[in-house]
Amino acid sequence: MLGVKLRMASYTLLLKLFSKPEYRSFLSVVMISVLTIIMWFVIAKEIGHYVRSIMMVTIFVAISALALNETVASFTNRRRDIAILIAVGIWKHLIGGILLLKTIVYTSIGWTLGMIIAYLLGWLGGISNNIVLQQIALFATVLVLGPTIVAGISCIFHTSRFNVPEVLRQ
Amino acid sequence: MTDDRKRTAVSVRDLHKNFESGYSETRLFNGLSFDINEGDFVAITGSSGTGKTTLMNLIAGLDKPTKGTIRVLGKELSLLNDRELTALRAESIGILFQTFGLLTDLNVKENIKVTQMITGKNNSDRERYSDELLEFFGLNNKADFNPSSLSVGEAKKVGIARALSTGPQVLLLDEPTGNLDPQSVNVLLPILRGLRHIYGKTIIMTTNTPRAAKIANREIHIEKPKIIPIM
């Protein structure tokens, strides 16, 4: 019954509460953009297969770490608000879902900005962007899904272990 | 047994809650048992550290007892899963926190409305009920204010209004008169009396203020906890 009510209800206030931009989020977007630009040029440049693989894995780990940092920081900075909302009857996994959505949105913004900037830089530098675009498409799914899964696991972990009385006591 | 006999809203049996801290264990409640009927206004009293807030958390299903059972509106809390406990709080229990628990990124009216989204009411109903509550508590002119700009007394009123916003059957008020100056207590006590008479809710209130305890129709006193050294 609650599930139906939850689906029917509007969550604008919760989104307003948790989507407030923070300086940390801005830095994450910039870092993800930079990493995407680096990835673009790693694909474009003719470097060894082995070195390229290492660089791609490094970029994947770095973007995942930024997504993870975003969710962990959201939980840490919003501990009190989350505890209050759970206490008044808002399901904790709904809050976790909103924080995950926020992370996905910021990661996607960083990723998209990085792609646009890299494409423009490549165009200006005379790099064959069409070939790079084809290769990027191969990695895109992994580089978007990977950080999302990492952030999702982090959200589930944090919401499951959230101790409301302890937070409210502080 | 008569038909008009009140039903039990909250039933606590043989309650124990232990906390370990360092080299000692604090044992709260020592087998406390009581029943609270629907429509009762009960004051939970006791000195600081006796576990009044912990008892509120236990009744709200936010914490689990070490031993004993708690039934709220006929449901035994230990048998409910996390989702069912959340649903019980959303639909049947209103809570005022000792520290008000207001969300500082939302204004006063939004703080009242935030809990209403789980009631399934449509937006116009929510808007109307929020306005009614703001009027009842004399906060109409502060609807757009940030909670951090309110006085302690006003923040408590917003906290109580939010607790009432989902139309709960049981209202848990944790120190509603705590940290208030005498003037604010004078304003808040008639409101608490009004809650009992106008809304007819089951109200459980923790307090250290004898004046506040007097407006309740029953008092439950919690004894000091036992502190046991751990070897």
Image (cartoon, grey):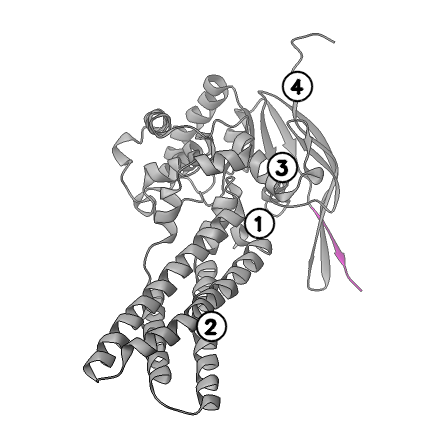
Q: Amino acid at mark 4?
A: Arg
Alpha carbon distance from label 4 to label 1: 29 Å
x then y, percent, for residue B204: 57, 30
Subunit that carries the residue with mark 3: B
Q: Which residue is mark 2?
A: A65
* Range of residues picked out in magenta: B225-231
Q: Quadrant of residue B55?
A: top right
Q: Amino acid at mark 1?
A: Pro
Alpha carbon distance from label 1 to label 3: 12 Å
Q: Is residue B229 magenta?
A: yes
Looking at marks 3 and 4 on the same chain, the residue that comes earlier in the sequence is marked by 4
Q: Nearer the viewer, residue B27 or B181?
A: B27
x then y, percent, for residue B164: 46, 29
Same chain for mark 3 and mark 2? The answer is no
Q: Which residue is mark 4?
A: B7
Q: Quadrant of residue B56?
A: top right
Q: Which residue is mark 1?
A: A165
